[in-house]
Amino acid sequence: MNFDLTDEQIQVRDMVREFAQREVAPHIREWDAEGKIDRGLIDKLGETGILGLPIPEAYGGLGLDYISLALACDELEYIDTSLRVILSVHVGLNSLSLQQWATEEQKRRWLVPQAQGEKIATFGLTEPAAGSDAGAIESTAVRDGGSYILNGSKMWISLADIADHFLIFASTDRSLKHRGLTAFVIERGTKGFTTGTIKGKLGVRAGNTGELAFDNVRVPLENRIGEEGEGFKIAMSCIDQGRFTVAAGAVGLIRASLDASVKYANERHTFGQPIGKHQLVQQMIAKMVAGRQASELLVYKAADLKNRGIRNTKETSLAKWFATDAALQAADDAIQIHGSYGFSNEYPVERFMRNARGSVIYEGTSQIHQILQAEYALGYREDKPLRKPQPPAAGFGN
């Protein structure tokens, strides 16, 4: 196995790194403290091509592979999780799903402007009473001639007040539970559709998170993605992509915690020597090294399967579970190494800790992923293709 990055992948990594360092790093402490997001920053992301990184050139993207996508997520989250979240919802949960499930006409209508960064997209599955249990979704879509009437709400939606396009899931037959879900694209400005921002979050404060409300929203038939009742399969394929980006971003957060800890441990002296000389500090740093390396390998394994068009729910689940748990542990240890300074925003590690805490909840809690891995090991679950596999991403292995 060759773990060397291609020249193209290195260029992507360096481009995203330079963008994040230039456009975000000087401002992130202020943005986090004020709890604000700069729409202009998202527009700049679009101008770089990052928002269409893995989308084929035929649909306005760069046509790059999943290793490149992982590297981009890593570099963005190294600076702040809010940056990676943009890539997760716009690319992972929405655009890649349209690429797989939308008709050609729908791709031209929504995917092309999203890949080019002209329109921002997000994903709406979670509800006030339905998170991990998608079968409990209460939002409904009732067929009315050539359209559907949507009613209900969504909660904890990233970019709720920013996005232009929303991939939404509602039940067309609640008696079927998750088998009655259907997917739709709703555009901002549709009558009866409103959004709002959630205040007081523990972490990802420089990102927008909110709620969606549907009050007799009329959605044309041509806005339905897939067939009636295919929504759960579509949602799970979306989440496979979203989990991948979360796992890849967690690698960046571990790396940020490690770099901050190494720097501080070499600068801070106690008992006449750098604290890095103390074995228990070394133990915490060693755990970060191991967590980063193992997480990266799990992410790359999932990326390889994605590049070859092979379903990877099990591998992506394991990468997401392991990497986010490792990121939370790394951030916690980084605060411990910084001591009292780690408890204030004078250093970035307290922000890393707040941001890492959310990642073990969204895109499937750590407990959900433990159940998935156990069921695979016990033979209760197996990966079956949801639809004809997508062709491998361009550039992999070149």
Image: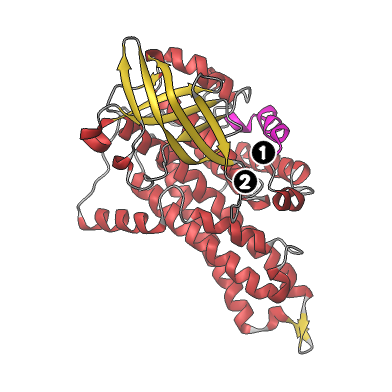
Picture quarter containing residue 196?
A: top right
Left or right: where 171 falls relative to 351: left
Front-lying residue, 195 or 65: 195
- What is the magenta range? 37-52
Crowding near pointer 1: few (<14 within 10 Å), some, many (20+)? few
Left or right: where 305 falls relative to 211: left
How many numbered dots are placed on residues in this image?
2
Left or right: where 83 falls relative to 109: right
Q: Is residue 358 above or below residue 165?
A: below
Q: Residue 251 at x, y = what percent? A: 56, 54
Residue 50 inside the magenta-drawn segment: yes
Q: Residue 33 at x, y = what percent? A: 72, 53
Picture quarter containing residue 12?
A: top right
Q: Residue at x 44, y 59 (%)?
A: 322
Q: Is residue 4 above or below residue 273?
A: above
Picture quarter containing residue 154?
A: top left
Furthest residue toward top: 146
Residue bearing the label numbered 2: 82
Q: Residue at x 53, y 28 (%)?
A: 194
Residue 272 visible? The answer is yes
The first of marks 1 and 2 along the sequence is: 1
Q: Residue 381 at x, y = what percent? A: 23, 49
Furthest residue toward bottom: 271
Residue 396 visible? The answer is no
Task: Please give the label number shown on residue 11.
Answer: 1
Q: Residue 279 at x, y = what percent? A: 62, 83
User: The residue tagged with tag 2: helix, strand or loop?
Assistant: helix
- Please tell me whether mark 1 or mark 2 is closer to you in this view: 2
Q: Amino acid at mark 1?
A: Gln
